[in-house]
Amino acid sequence: MKSFLLATALAFASVPAFAQPDAPSAPAAAPAAPATAPVAPLPDANPALFVVRDADTTIYLFGTFHLLDGRPWFNDEVRTAFDASDELVMEAVLPEDPAALQPLILRYAVDPDGRTLSSRLSAEQNAALTRALAEAGAPPATFDRFEPWFVSMTLAVIGAQRLGISTEAGPETLLTSAAQARRIPIGELEGFEFQLRLLDSMPEALQLEQLSETLEKNDEIATMLAPMLAAWSSGDVDRLAALMNEDMETDQDRALYQLIFTNRNAAWAGWIQERLARPGTVFVAVGAGHLAGSGSVQEALRTHGITATRVPH
């Protein structure tokens, strides 16, 4: 599976993870080790943090990894920046009741013409999908009425969970809880409906290509995701960008990157420019892929004459 397509599938990981209608649960975990067995501590993560400032406004830009395990990361300069902020802004505000998103999922993720997914896949692809769903404990017809993009995302999330990561330990979940505890406002750059509408707007050829790649390398998702998680944990933005872009080869790849990353980054840069006109300190948390590589938020900010600097660890 192309690393870029995996990054795209997980760019909106919080959507399917929070609102899969009748979606399969992750495969059962291995039995827990005996209580007496030593448990190796998870490594301390030092993800990248950037800041934009003017005379009376400070905006921190934190790159998240939507699915995560229990490794410590909410400390040091990240915690200091959050504690100094009087507002949290994310791509989309997490719903208190995930079931509230199901009507939106049904509106945008189900094929509007009633076509079945199996009718759009080859016999080989259908067999691969049946195997992937069986491994997740789901019957073959579970997603037959859904669009290819939604199935690809769901399989990517299930594959990622083999690393022991999920949204429950993800930065968005923890930041939301921390903001609620401090009773500071929580805002959003887009909202879940915008994101679903964007994904649904992907040309069918791109959706089918993404699903084909996901099915072809379904067993390797965790293996391919591991170095991306390692790059995020070490704050290696250049490495993360290289992993995302190492196999972006076709015009379809570039069109998808433009849709999912470049265009949205440019819109967020415009939001930051407008927010700088009002005083205050804001903690903005978006997927780390948006703060890395060509077309990043920082690059888009430079077109507005605004410089984002790295906060030292």
Image (cartoon, rainbow, N blue to C red):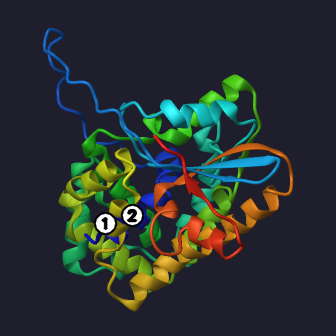
Q: Residue furthest bottom?
A: 251
Instruction: Verify CB contact (< 8 Å) between mark 2 and mark 1.
Output: yes
Q: Which residue is mark 1?
A: 243
Local packing at callout 1 (Cα closer than 10 Å; few below 14, some 14-19, many 20+) is: many
SS of the residue under disc 1: helix
Q: Residue at x 13, y 14 (%)?
A: 37
Where is residue 268 shown, x and y percent of the image? Answer: 67, 64
Where is residue 309 shown, x and y percent of the image? Answer: 57, 56
**First in residue order: circle 2 vs circle 1:** 2
> In the displayed structure, would residue 282 be above or below residue 250?
above
Question: Residue 103's image quarter?
Answer: bottom right
- Residue 138 can be seen, yes or no: no
Closest to the camera, between mark 2 and mark 1, is: 1
User: In this rendering, would 112 be left or right of 86?
Assistant: left
Q: Residue at x 54, y 46 (%)?
A: 311
- Front-lying residue, 309 or 43: 309
User: In this rendering, would 67 be left or right of 192?
Assistant: left
Q: Which mark is residue 7?
A: 2
Q: CA distance from mark 2 to mark 1?
A: 9 Å
- Front-lying residue, 145 or 256: 256
> In the displayed structure, would residue 169 be above or below residue 223?
above
Q: Residue at x 61, y 37 (%)?
A: 81
SS of the residue under disc 2: helix
Local packing at callout 2 (Cα closer than 10 Å; few below 14, some 14-19, many 20+) is: many
- Front-lying residue, 214 or 262: 262
- Amino acid type at image mark 2: Ala
- Amino acid type at image mark 1: Leu
